[in-house]
Image: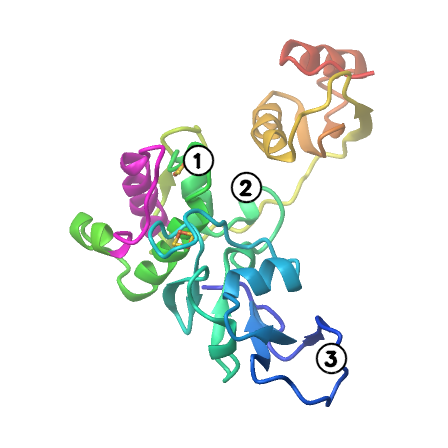
Amino acid sequence: MLSPAPATTATTTGTTALTAGAAVPATMRRVSLKIDGLSHDVVVDNRESLWETMNFQLGLANSNLGCDRAQCGACAVLVDGKPMNSCTILSSRLGRGQKITTVASLATGPGVEGLHPIQRAFWLDGGFQCGICTKGFIMSTYALLTAIPKPTHGQIADAVSGNICRCGEYAGVFRAVDTAAAEMRGEKVTYVSKPIVVEAAAPAAAPTVTGTSKQFDFVNPFSTIEEFDPFAQQLKAQAGILDVSGSQGTITVKWDPSKLTEAQVRALLASMGRAVK
Ligand code: FES
Ligand code: FES
């Protein structure tokens, strides 16, 4: 299910020199776009695509632009539950209460654990390389699995037939859809690319050991935040490590002082290629 976005919260974004209540030229339209549970009041050019409004007026980078001509599906979002190419659908047609859903509303928390099962499966089962197509594939998959919990590969092929991956990651896409479907049905899944197991119904275990926690600065920060999560997962799997959080430049490690010293934690980080100051 989608994360419970606050459906009635309104965000008003003034976007043109038109003042509130002023007459709108015939070439423009005043619309209220319902995106991920928030209402955005905007004045749009009649020729403006939803992708243009989201990115240029609202600052929402929730879908990628590939071809900009309804050929690749990279820009797909859901409109009333159906995948649509946001590069091609006009914003001026979307002000009558249609519910627009983007990939931004799927996650329910931080890190890999907080991702929607479909996002997690694409991340851990390798359904992407450059990632330009991924948001579109995820939205098409979301629509599919909402309607068909256990699709055949033929049904998956139909559902993502409007999405093109120029990196050719189709085998990974099918694997990711299979995995996501299984997790959404409540089954235990194991990811191909990462040795972690998710038990859908299992409650999060509360930490029972009082640990020592300290923030460190990396000698060489990660280039992107996306690189941090896999590193944190690897570190968490080490004996004596209780929790890990951080960013591109810093890492906060909580460890069991009966098993590790600070010097050993520093040495562990260095042995994993991320020395700290
Ligand atoms: S960018 Fe919209 S279909 Fe390609
Ligand atoms: S991952 Fe590069 S286009 Fe699909």
Question: Which residues are drawn in magenta?
Answer: 159-183
- x then y, percent, for residue 247: 72, 34
The 10 Å Cα crowd at callout 3, few under 14, some 14 to 19, many 20 or more, is: few
Q: What residue type is labelled 1?
A: Leu
> Badge 1 is on which residue?
124
Residue 9 within the segment the image draws in magenta: no
Q: Which of marks 2 and 1 is nearer the N terminus?
A: 2
- From this view, report whether residue 50 is shown above or below residue 215: below
Under circle 1, the secondary element is: helix
In the image, taking residue 255 as reference, residue 229 lies left or right, namely: left
Discs 2/3, front? 3
Q: Are marks 2 and 1 in contact (CB under 8 Å)?
A: yes
- x then y, percent, for residue 182: 32, 49
For the residues marked 2 and 1, what is the alpha-carbon distance in whole angstroms?
A: 9 Å
Q: Residue 37 carries which label?
A: none
Residue 180 within the segment the image draws in magenta: yes
Which residue corresponds to the image point at 51% horizontal and 72% vertical from the top-left? 91
Which residue corresponds to the image point at 42% horizontal and 32% vertical from the top-left? 129
> Badge 2 is on which residue?
112
> Badge 3 is on which residue?
18
- From this view, report whether residue 136 is shown above or below residue 217: below
Q: Quadrant of the C terminus?
A: top right
